Image: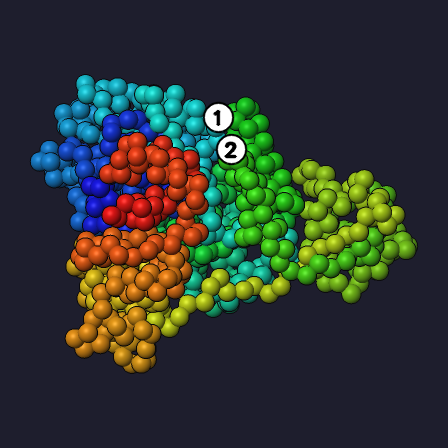
Amino acid sequence: MSKALNTLQQYFGYKQFRNSQSSVIDCILRGKDTLAVMPTGGGKSICYQIPALLFEGVTIVISPLISLMKDQVDNIKDLGISAEYINSSLSYKNIKEIIEKIKANEVKILYVAPERLEAADFCELIKSLNVSQIAIDEAHCVSSWGHDFRTSYRNISKFIKMFTKKPVVSAFTATATEEVREDIIRLINLNNPKVFISGFDRENLKINVLKLSNRFSYVLNYIVENKDQSGIIYVATRKEADNIYEKLLDNNISASRYHAGLSDEDRRKNQEDFVYDRINVMVATNAFGMGIDKSNVRFVIHYNIPKNIEGYYQEIGRAGRDGEKSECILLFAPQDIMTQKYLIEVGTQRPERRVLEYKKLQTIIDFVHHNGCLRSYILEYFGEKVSDDNCNNCSNCLSEGELVDRTIEAQKVISCIYRMKRDFGVKTIVDVLRGSAQKKILQYKFNELSTYGIMKDYSKDKLSDFINTLISHGFIDLREGEFPTVILNENSMKVLKNEVKVIFKEFVKAKKISSDNELFEGLRNLRREIAKEEGVPPYFIFSDSTLKEMSVKYPIEKEHILEISGVGQIKYEKYGEVFISFIKNYVLENKITTSDTLNRFKDGNKTKTFEVTMNMINEGMSVNETAEERKLTVGTILNHIEKYIAETNNLDFNLDLTGIVTVEQENNIKSVIEEIGMSKLTQIKAKLPNDISFEAIRGTILKNYKN
């Protein structure tokens, strides 16, 4: 795995693999078919790109996302990787040129749409090549039980069978239940595959479900509060997208829109404006986002309830792909359920598929009404066992907002519905409670009811939203139909009899997602200028997380900036000196005097960064404490210690691994090392319990075997 790690560092600038990336890559490199279920933003593409660079032949990547291919290929080309794509967006001449490059062995990774596998001439060409790996992205599309079934995916197994020497096959997905995983293995015909489920959790995403009185007012306040951040607002219909987009423009918000009602050119331009940070907010139907790999989306707002958990989780996964804290907000109103049911009825022809869609819709409705941890609900839906039902990063676990007793107002509404005797919609009930003199109200003699006008101080919108909130909390029900009507239920009677209190959470004003320092903003502006000159999206240069790390560590020399996550040798050669120069000027202008920066920056007296680490270790600080003090990862601190040993041959130091490895774990690690040696960390890890990390193994080796 040392070659894989070196490749990761050289091309991508990361110092270590995330989660199960290392195990997945190792499995592919050993030639075993592999199915990896990893969350959106969890680094799936690296899992097939690293083997592609290490294998002799070409890797074919099958992806349904035509608009994403260009992004992905442009991105890895920018890293110095020879890649191309073939899909329906290219001319015959373009395709012919790419085929010539493939024949000349000038392409390491080729992205293709699944429909391309039906072309006999293309298959004949590919059959003649040395294809080392076939990687299938969005593999859940092969399953009719999945949320995004594509018939073209059923051609993949036939395509694989045509090879005399079968390539290693790797399949990747972010949203697959156990049923869908079994379908993937069977329908793609994976040969005794190793299945990796690295966990569906995205810890950096804060998940909120809000039942608010005025959704647009909240959204507007939220965007104003986070005006410098990129975000997506998902809506159920084109009409809703146009409506919100126009309202945002009226309020001077930098926004665009994306839906099927726009021309191809308008969609392309609007998407590009968002990817290139020319606008901050995209209002879109769920078709948007499948074609982007933008890493700095800080918030995703669902203005309407989505149609299923899989789609919801894939869409919120477009936030925080760089690992930085991001927020996902679902704004719920009961009428959204009717919209989704209508879309199912008109958009789903097969009866069995319609039943499945209704079942999936019910799971997201249950999610909205769930009183426990929202993150746990999602993880358990995908079959992941959760030990702690408190993530401390969702609206239910955080309990943000003030609890307010709304029982009296609820009793007024319920009493009015009871006295009206017949079923009516929300609008009519609002008119009675506000004392309207409309003809319909007088015709039914509702003006003679004791509840007539008892809530006249409420605006129409506020009262309508309050009734919808009562519905969403189950205090009254909505009877389905072309014209939904409000009806009472068992809970309604309990409220009237004071057996149940109606307690709602009144949410406080929208907050900033995060506060960024001045240097970060300067680096972001520098990135934007470079991106504009080169004609690439800003995140191609460096991600937000890389800039944030620079803004707290002040890397002012080559060796320092190469330690920043996301800065590899290739990125350094292209952009390193420009960013170092900017940071140096900032340090001088602001007279920054942190000891670490001064030691690096003083004339002729440049202390190496690993020496700063070792000074702390020799002063008795633990590895964990040193990492926290220096704002570095534990893995980086261990790298410093290894570098110190390599350069000085000095082994006279003690290592405190408190918080990294327990005594029992340390003994387990030592037992395995005595059995198989310590040269291959992956093999050691495979023989140990899952809760023992690579850092624990490396730390144990450094502590016990340095002599």
In the displayed orientation, state which residue is furthest to the left.
104
Residue 656 appears in the rendering = yes
Question: What residue is at 28 percent from the left and 51 percent from the top?
Answer: 15
The residue at the point 64 percent across, 53 percent down is 211
Which quadrant holds residue 306?
Answer: top right
| Residue neighbourhood size for the residue with mark 1, other residues' Cα within 10 Å, grouped as few (<14), some (14–19), many (≥20) | few
State the residue at coordinates (50%, 43%).
Answer: 312
Residue type at mark 1 is Glu
Which quarter of the figure has residue 697?
Answer: top left
* Numbered mark located on residue 179 in the image: 1
SS of the residue under disc 2: loop
Front residue (pair 239, 653)? 653
How many C-alpha atoms fall within 10 Å of the one at disc 2: few (<14), some, or many (≥20)?
some
Q: Tell me the quadrant of the picture where the N terminus can be found.
A: top left
Residue at 21% from the left image edge and 57% from the top image edge: 650
Q: Is residue 543 visible?
A: no
- Camera-near label (1 vs 2) is 2
Locate residue 459, reporting x and y percent: 72, 63
> In the rendered image, which residue does mark 2 sit on?
383
Q: Gap between marks 1 and 2, in whole Å?
A: 10 Å
Label 2 sits on what residue type? Gly
Q: Secondary structure at mark 1?
A: helix
